[in-house]
Image (cartoon, coloured by chain):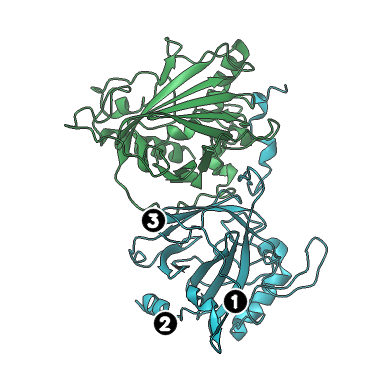
Chain colours: A green, B cyan
Amino acid sequence: MRTTHVLQAAGIVLLVLATPVMGQEAGPRAAAATPRPLERLADGQPDVQGHWNPVNPGSLSLTNPVPQQADFDPTIKPLPSRIVDPPDGRVPYQPWAAALQKQQNRDYAYPSKPEHIDTQHRCLLSGVPRLFTIVPALKIVQSPGQIVFIWDSYHAYRVIPLDGRPHVASNVKLWMGDGRGRWEGNTLVIDTTSVKGQRLTYIGDFYSEHAHIVERLTWPDADSMIYEATITDPAVFTRPWTMRVAQRRRPDEEMWETACFEGMADPDQFLLKNAQGIR
Amino acid sequence: MRLRLLTFLIPATLVLPAHASAATVSGEAVQAPAPAAIPRTSDGKPDLSGIWQVLNTAAWDIQDHAAQKGVPGGQGVVVGNEIPYRPEALAKKRENYEKRAALDPEAKCYLPGVPRLVYMPFPFQIVQTPRELTFLHEFVHAVRYVFMDGKPHPPAPIEWWLGDSRGRWEGDTLVVDVVHFNDQTWFDRAGNFHSTALHLVERFTLLDADHIQYDVRVEDPKVFTRPWDMSMVLYRRRERNVQLFDYECYGFDWEKTYPYPDMRTGQ
């Protein structure tokens, strides 16, 4: 399945090359003459419905978000880390977790066991915040008292109640976690518990089932959004840390069926046989 | 265009005049039961938003069936109980039933198709905006859009697991025309099946705030000798703070694999 990985990487590169390269943290529509202000829905929510996409998409790496483009165009400078806190832009792993991330990076390159195959390749849900970094579009639908995120791929979705209800029991683990939202002006704050342990990137970054995630989605105007997620997981990290992904509005289009279903891919397609020799 | 035409030929039998419930007999007003109030959106359309689920056994068999081990018995949802298979198709249905443990697409974790998704024993949520209704299913987190902006189906050939759904309002009834299916899904665990020529017309009518009358006309001339109908009720899940969880299909033994064993902290 090396070809799949290569094709996927190439697809990411082509997509990135097709769009103007901007600073990771720059407003996506900085050049636009007059930003459109947000309008309000009948229930008071800012109207942020429509299709969204990272300015620099891809979930290969958090610290080196789109390294592949340099393979095609050496004049393109590397992008800054998505991690904005701590200031060094690195994931503050505990030593055992740092070692596991490196091992999982090797396992991704030379997969020999089913657990080395990324959940996204099995059509399982990769959860938050990872889905806010992927290439395929995100759609937001709002109705009174809730905001719904739907991803084109994996038919992943997430319904966030805004009515202040309590979280589900902490022993319940959900693929997308259990999110509760509230609006603070033009910022949607989502508090998520009950996550499963998930990978954050293809190269083995991860959090455990003890993670607590607070996301802040801020709309400076109607066409751009800054996504931030702060992850606290005392089992894996030495301190809370925050990643940021600038997003921009895409043209509205009908989302058609993406037929990704569990069990669709034969794991043997991904696994390198006799991989022990390679490692 | 044939499909579009057929859509218009289907009579709008479910559009009940809401004001017809008070009859006058010999000058005296006879008070029939008042029509139940239904929730409406700000643009006056019936509001189907919410979490819904069937209370029937159609997921196992859409026809009348007695209980078996692991299968609750129950009345079917096929109007008249008979499915008008062509002779060769009936033979295939019987073969499907005999080999259902191996052949059922649900057991293979395929997306289950429509209308099967609606009457599986899992809740689903309807999110309604004027432009579209989004069906979010707990079962394998399937998503179906019903586009309401009047655009036609995209041109064939398209084979999707859930088909292409285009809706419109006929009075207070949501009418959804669905085409562009593949032939890999069944209607139930009993082997009832269809071809790529499947054409559905679904009708969603709020009976009151908490019940939807759900009727489906099924047409597939390659498999059936004539159109036939399903009819059932969708019940609103009214529990306090009710929400969808998730159900993966367990197409392989992923619980051994994910979360990745080494990532489990065991705390």
SS label for mark 3 = loop
Q: Residue A229 placed where, x, y %?
A: 47, 24
Mark number displayed over residue B9: 2
Horizontal side of A123 relative to A246 (left or right) equals: right
In front of the other: A202 or A27: A27
Question: How many residues crowd mark 1 within 10 Å: few (<14), some (14–19), many (20+)?
Answer: few
Q: Is residue B96 above or below residue A261?
A: below
Mark 2 Cα shell of 10 Å, populated few (<14), some (14-19), many (≥20):
few
Horizontal and vertical percent position of residue A5: 44, 36
Q: Earlier in the sequence, mark 1 or mark 3?
A: 1
Q: Is residue B43 above or below residue A101?
A: below
Q: Chain of mark 2?
A: B
Q: Are marks 1 and 3 in contact (CB under 8 Å)?
A: no
Disc 1 and disc 2 on one polypeptide chain: yes
Q: Which residue lies most toward the front here? A: B27
**Label 3 belongs to which residue?**
B130
Query: Disc 1 residue type?
Result: Ala
B244 in relation to B113, above or below: above
